[in-house]
Image: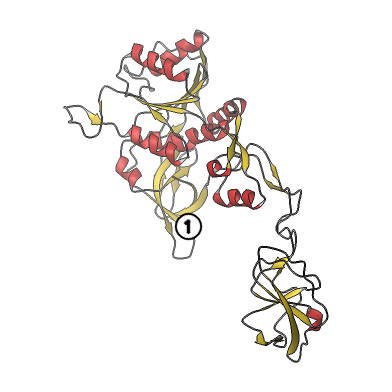
Amino acid sequence: MNPSIVPDFPSGLPFEQARAIVAAVAAAQRLPSQTLALARAHGHVLAQDVVAPMALPSFDNSAMDGFAVRHADLATDADSALQLVGEQFAGHSLGLAIGRRQCLRITTGAPLPAGADAIAIKESACVDGNRVVVPAGSVRPGAHVRRTGEDVRAGDRVLEAGWVMSPARIALAASLGIGQLEVARRPTVAVFTTGDELVEPGMALQPGQIYNSNRELLMGLLRGDGLEPTAWPSLADDPARVASMLQDAASSFDVVITCGAVSAGEKDHIPALLQHQAAAGRGRMHFWKVRMKPGMPLLFAQLERAQLLCLPGNPVSVLATYLTFGRALLDGLQGRLEPRPHWHARLASAFDKRHARREFLRGRLLPGADGTLQVAPNPADGSHRLAAAAQSDALIVLPEGEHAFVAGELVEVLPY
């Protein structure tokens, strides 16, 4: 640990305890809601329950093209001839009715005429002038009739606060005539990468320099989660400049995410900087260091109005900490109640875990020959090995404690 840091905040936390702190902070800092038109509400988190103002369907109607009939008029052991007395198409109700041994031509979605209780489909019936012959036993009671409220009843709670508005949920709101929704405002996010060694892709490298991959990794993850992050210029290893830039961002954004300068090296200025700001009353240290691999130096703090999530600099650490802590923070700020997908799969090969921390391996999900989901661990487990992350599509979650995992053992997986 940097000798200038005397920790008066939680440090070296178990994974679940750190996650609980993130959840509690996010819940206390919930973002306000806003009203958006349906077309703009896709992917947002619903902030208010939606109660159906009407039934779906709102009237009895036909599910097929054919003929509206009275089931009592149909014989079970012989064909039945009915008188065709009119037609009802979708779009406008004509207020029609049928009587004994009568039928009405009808199209899909058209209102069911009074007296009718079933539909004889067009393909089965035979039309002869104003007579329609229905084959014996071809129509069951209530066949192809959509009843009022069979999908949704007026007053039903159809969408719940905390749900993410998927296309199907947006479509349900539209079908109820709802033109706008109350949703959580999405957090504004600033992204920083740090290090004298960083060079932007496309530029020439000098000895000792590396290309800045973390910015694209983080920006892509955030955009994939529906956010519009702002990338700030990479920060040199200059504590005064780091302090000034973070202070500027923290006064303007809801969340600031940094990569690098967060461990205990000579150039890792962020922990001491944030502790100094907290001591001056401008922020708070929530925790530093989590017992996880990769990603142990993770730091979570508040500076001015912003929550700061300071990730380690190795790219796989960035991936693991964003998927496990970054998403938890951003989801919590928006009041998302639906959990992110986490599945279970069987290991396609053995893995020997020889440390006590919770570990997140890169792996590729595969369909097993027996129909079960399998996951193949990538043997390249170094936190700097980005190619292994690119070849994978999930993190394999290995719980705390040493353990020799055998092929076929059930493990938790987090899809990217």
Instruction: Say which residue label 1 marks.
Output: 373
390, above or below 254, in the image: below
Residue in the picture at 75% in, 54% down? 153
Q: Is residue 90 above or below residue 404?
A: below
**Can the viewer see residue 2?**
no
**Along the horizontal axis of the image, is 159 left or right of 250?**
right
Q: Is residue 56 left or right of residue 280?
A: right
Does dot 1 land on a helix, a strand or a loop?
Answer: strand
Residue at x 18% of width, y 30% of height: 205
The kind of residue on which mark 1 rests is Leu
Residue 411 screen position, x and y as percent: 49, 49
The total number of labels drawn is 1
Which residue is found at the position 49% from the left and 60% from the top? 372
Q: Can the viewer see residue 213 in this picture?
A: yes
Residue 211 % position (x, y): 25, 32
Coloured how?
Answer: secondary structure
